[in-house]
Amino acid sequence: MGFPVDGFESALRYDARPEDIFISTYPKCGTTWMQHLVWLILNGGEPLGPEQKMTEVIPHLEEVGAEVVGRLPDPRVIKTHLPVGLVRLDPWTRVIYVARNPFDCAVSFFHHTRGFVNHYDFAGGTFEDYLECFISGEVDFGDYFENVSGWLARRGERRFLLTTYERMSEDSGRVVRDVAEFLGPALRRAVADEELMAKILRHSGFAAMSKDQLRWASARPEGMPPFVRRGVVGDWKTYFSPEGARRLIERVEACPAALTMEAIWPDIMAEARDFARG
């Protein structure tokens, strides 16, 4: 199973509207977390119910295609994992981009890949094998470094909001306020209400999102990690070898956004270099 070819091709032809709100990420960088956070902000802190599906209320453009997205009411909220060069944005389209450090991203994507047994033949794969594919960009949705470099080049644009998985973990309240302000003055004023803010934070937290996971993704076989797995920063140290860390550091240093990535994750990059030295 995979994305319908017609849907994917039509997604590449989708012309974003000024009212659209794009949530863009490389996979496993906080996509579903940000989708639900935006949903909560737009819906008065009311979470998706157990019978609702995130794929229906904030659809994945390249999975469902342009026609399905086009039927959504304004403002459309749309998810994409496409690199920036493949998304036809209007100058007024809002884009929220969530970046995650490549070490934790690789670990999370490894578990994602082996858990979706109907999509990938990797249930018995090792992290070492997966890391080789990740470093070379031979994984679903292509090269992490191409995706991150392209989108980070938009930093500073008026209709572009950059946040990180790490910031969402460390200061969720600040991220909620940033997103609400980005989406408009009325929402900025709304989240100033302490009761609403507390409700949003409660329903977007790991404990709440770990429940009723069929809201986010299809069921996984018994024995596989859940879709919402751990929600922490630094899990990579459990899986990486010093040699693996060294090779991924080299890949970071060779990518166009190397300096930006170093500025975004200085502590993680320093920790990874220490780890690589054994």
Image (cartoon, grey):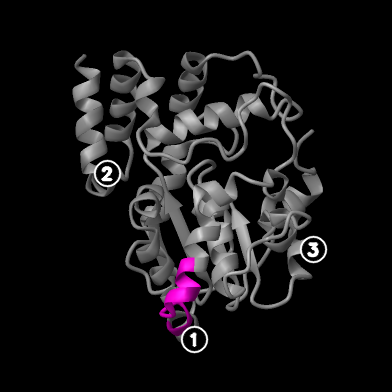
User: Mark 2: which amino acid?
Assistant: Trp
Question: Mark 2 or 3 closer to N-term?
Answer: 3
Q: Nearer the viewer, mark 1 or mark 2?
A: 1
User: Mark 1: which amino acid?
Assistant: Ala
Residue 107 magenta: no
Q: CA distance from mark 1 to mark 2?
A: 32 Å
Q: Which residue is mark 2?
A: 265
Question: What residue lies at 52% left-to-right and 67% top-to-bottom?
Answer: 199
Q: CA distance from mark 2 to mark 3?
A: 38 Å
**Is residue 139 in sight in this rendering?**
no
Q: Quadrant of the N terminus?
A: top right
Q: Give the class, few, some or many, for how many residues have Cα within 10 Å of label 2's Cα (few <14, many ≥20).
A: some
Question: Mark 1 or 2 closer to N-term?
Answer: 1
Question: What residue lies at 68% left-to-right and 78% top-to-bottom?
Answer: 74
Q: Which residue is mark 3?
A: 67
Q: CA distance from mark 3 to mark 1?
A: 30 Å
Q: Which residue is mark 1?
A: 186
Query: Where are the magenta residues, as a range?
Result: 189-198
**Is 56 above or below relative to 125?**
below
Q: Give the class, few, some or many, for how many residues have Cα within 10 Å of label 1's Cα (few <14, many ≥20).
A: few
Question: What residue lies at 63% left-to-right and 24% top-to-bottom?
Answer: 114
Question: Mark 3 or 1 closer to N-term?
Answer: 3
Q: Tell me where residue 191 sits by quadrant.
A: bottom left
Q: Nearer the viewer, mark 3 or mark 1?
A: 1
Q: Quadrant of the C terminus?
A: top left
**Is residue 193 in sight in this rendering?**
yes
Residue 195 magenta: yes
The residue closer to the viewer here, 198 or 222, is 198
Q: Position of residue 173 (x, y in %)?
A: 38, 64
Q: Position of residue 271 (x, y in %)?
A: 22, 30
Q: Give the class, few, some or many, for how many residues have Cα within 10 Å of label 3's Cα (few <14, many ≥20).
A: few
